[in-house]
Amino acid sequence: MATRFDAIMARRGEIMLKALGMDYSEFEQSPIAFDYEGMMAAHGYSLQDIVAIQTKAGVGNTPLLELRNLTDVVRSMSAPGKGARIFVKDEAANMAGAFKDRRASVSIHVAKEKGYEGVIAATSGNYGAAVSSQAARYGLKCIIVQETFDSRHIGQPEIVEKSRICEAFGAEVIQLTVGPELFFHMVELLDLTGYFAASLYSSFGVSGIETLGLEIADEMTALTGAPPTHCVITHAGGGNTTGTARGLKRAGATDTQIISASVDLSGLHMASDNDFNRKSFTTGHTGFGVPFATWPDRADVPRNAARSLRYIDRYLTVTQGEVFYITEAMSKIEGLERGPAGNTAMTAAVSLARDLPREATVVVQETEYTGAGKHHWAQLNFAREMGVEVRRGDPTDNAPGKVIVIPERPEQIQAKDFDVARMRTSYVRNALKQAPQGYAPTAADIAFLAADTNSDAAAVEAIVATLKEA
Amino acid sequence: MTDATRCNAGDWVEVERVLLEPADRSKNLPPETAEKPLRMWIKGFAQAAGAVGEAMTIETMSGRMVEGTLSAINPGYFHTFGNPIPELVHVGVDLRARLAEYHSAQAAGANAEGGER
């Protein structure tokens, strides 16, 4: 007999079609390819329309700050002529405390325009706060489904804080124990309520982030005479990277290197009741970053608008201990007390800037709010309570879920390059798996895969040939 | 974390329920998750007087009626910052000293790569 889980998941397509306010099937071109740009443009909003929506919603236009002291720390340990200038876009200044307000603002605007009574999102992160805040402004009901507790009812303090802030904005918060079935419950609630699915991965959400890239290009040009040479982006599901990179390109900043950065949580299982409270980062980590980059269409929409491999030039990983060190440093030498997850890119930027020429400009494109539960002290105290060892030493000794090593000196902060070529191969493998047995990719499919991996047809054909042999 | 064990109709409360029993859960779970039920907590206004542990219906913020077991009355938030982290208390002092040294070296022209920015 089919379980309730199976019954809902079987009707998922039909329920989501009603809840997304958009028919994705018209963009499908083959078992592999679809019209990505067509899907992104289908909402009909220009970038200027989105700026107007966000201005009205109180979102965006956050300060761009030069971090002179952090730059000097980097220069104090750089080779002669090295040590790029570091800037940050203080996205914590958005109403709900993170860049996620940009993402939520367009979705909630669309929900209101299309006449939905309420919105639903499944998220344990800042996005829940953003959706709740925007829904409050638009007078829409709001349900946030969160993975909050382990089976002992112990909550990650960062997520417990996220429950609080969503409830503060008047949302109904559904707190669940560990498991990917929070998406099942979201679909069940969409069916029950007829609300709009404010998916993180819709074209509405990702288009909303493009204004961040636009602001960075314009503000850096005003400040330094040119767009940044490098933009470092904390990377989880890939929307942040995709939206920011698209915005930069649309603003003409086509030479800006796009660097994604995630906290290394390798070895921890994202659906494990045991591992859940042994990680000190609930987002911006490799546990989301790698699977979503290598197969974006695992998301809650038929086709994910966040396709980060299209834009990534480099993907850097840092350790939890390194990010906590930089988070503390930001407070003490820049007077900027912000949440640790948003400082993931900052940590990678310190490592990156050290090896770049002094003339280079590195923009870290977000910060997030901090406070009780989200603060790096709260995270480290909680890690200790969960049996994770916290000590000073060499960050290469970090072991996710077991040991958090806080660097003793900034020289020890060394981001690692994740192999983007390997990610492209995994992506192509996953894309080919979607086609029926024996389907031969056409030239159009190869061109799509090349665009979707920021490579060329020859490179994709070589990957396809290698996969065939294996 | 409230001492109250009884609520009146209209009080702000929390109910708990099992959303999926282990047998009904997704098939792709690690064993330590698969063997446990998927539990849910949700807050709203009590529809009747009742005691913790008893069946209760609440009206949630979206106006839905949800049934469960009354788990808390006027539930609060008790997450904190906690104690300072001994492994981090040195960071500010170290970096400010480093900056002072770097800036004075710059000012003295001792750094060949220095100069005004």
Image (spheres, coloured by chain):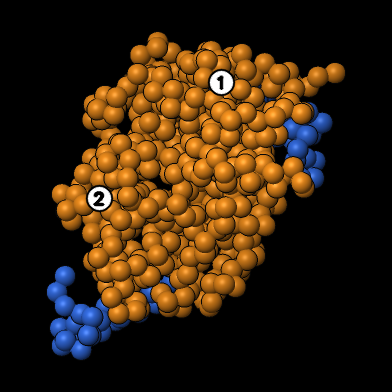
Chain colours: A orange, B blue
Would residue B63 be found to the left or right of residue A151 on screen? left
| Residue pictured at 67% horizontal, 34% vertical | A432
Would residue A271 be found to the left or right of residue A417 on screen? right
Residue A335 location in percent, x, y? 27, 62
Q: What residue sits right under mark 2 in the picture? A: A227
* Above-or-below relation of A276 to A43: below
Residue A39 location in percent, x, y? 46, 23
Give the residue type at disc 1: Glu
Would residue A453 be found to the left or right of residue B93 on screen? right
The part of the image, by quadrant, that contains residue A240 is top left
Q: Residues within 10 Å of mark 1 (few under 14, many from 20)?
A: some
The one of A448 and A352 positioned closer to us in this rendering: A448
Q: Secondary structure at mark 2?
A: loop
Labels 1 and 2: the sequence-earlier one:
1
| Residue pictured at 53% horizontal, 72% vertical | A395
* Above-or-below relation of A313 to A94: below
Give the residue type at disc 2: Pro
Q: Residue furthest top?
A: A115
The part of the image, by quadrant, that contains residue A271 is top right
Q: Secondary structure at mark 1?
A: loop
Q: What residue sits right under mark 1 in the picture? A: A28
Residue A105 location in percent, x, y? 35, 29
Which chain letter matches label 2? A
The one of B18 and B52 positioned closer to us in this rendering: B18
- For the residues labelled 1 and 2, the Cα–Cα distance comes to 35 Å
